[in-house]
Amino acid sequence: MESIITNRFERERAEMIELLKTRGIKDELLLKAMNKVEREKFVLPAFLNRAYDDCALPIACGQTISQPYTVAFQTEKLRAKKGDKILEIGTGSGYQAAILAEMGCKVYTIERIMELYLKARKLFEELGYHIASRCGDGTIGWPEFAPYNGIIVTAAAPEAPKALLDQLADGGRLVIPVGDLNVQSIRVITKAGDKFEVEDSYGFKFVPLIGKEGWNNDKNN
């Protein structure tokens, strides 16, 4: 029975990869990683049958695991390569961090909700991923290990936090959903010397980024 279920997930994972290709995802390192990471390990038991559906799914604490296409889109925009130092804001289920680790990146991830942080850290250990994690306010980043080749944010902000921009290496990219609480664009900000180049892709929906430079600060209350 276990082998039947395993074969089913392998087939659904392969089908997910083909769907991502038809939707324009081309990064072979990314596709290879997504074909290896077992998404079913990161969803709640009640949603196992939908693990590879191309939609967001609920996880604990009112949060979600993003749809596979959104994960792939954000990660491709990051242009991560083996050996890059990547900071993730919003560990959530741990799926995004696992994909980056599978791509050969050195991953640092921050989660503000203790329950999710502990669960993800345990899962990383079980799956053999060497990912640095902490529980705290992701909007202020992790300056002790800066600068980063890339920073990826998995929750929506009213604007890109200055602290994260400050922690980018020259040539580094910040990929972050920016907008109101109903709809956002995925913004890619590339650091070029003392300037920043900005690119927006519209029509996405994320949970809100909470923190000092997120939605619960004074200017947004």
Image (tube, helix red, strand yellow):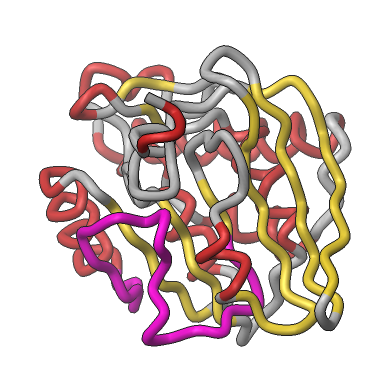
Q: Quadrant of residue 174?
A: bottom right
- The C terminus lies in quadrant: top left
Residue 123 percent coordinates (x, y): 22, 57
Q: Is residue 63 left or right of residue 70?
A: left
User: Which of 161/206 is in front?
Assistant: 161
User: Which of 47/171 is in front?
Assistant: 171
Q: Is residue 169 left or right of residue 163?
A: right
Which residue is depicted at the point 64% across and 39% down? 14
- The N terminus lies in quadrant: top left
Which residue is depicted at the point 62% across and 66% down? 165
Residue 119 percent coordinates (x, y): 16, 50
Above or below 221: residue 29:
below
Residue 29 percent coordinates (x, y): 72, 65
Which residue is depicted at the point 86% across and 76% down? 192
Q: Is residue 85 magenta?
A: no
Which residue is depicted at the point 70% across and 69% down? 80
Above or below 152: residue 155:
above
- Residues in magenta, as a range: 128-151
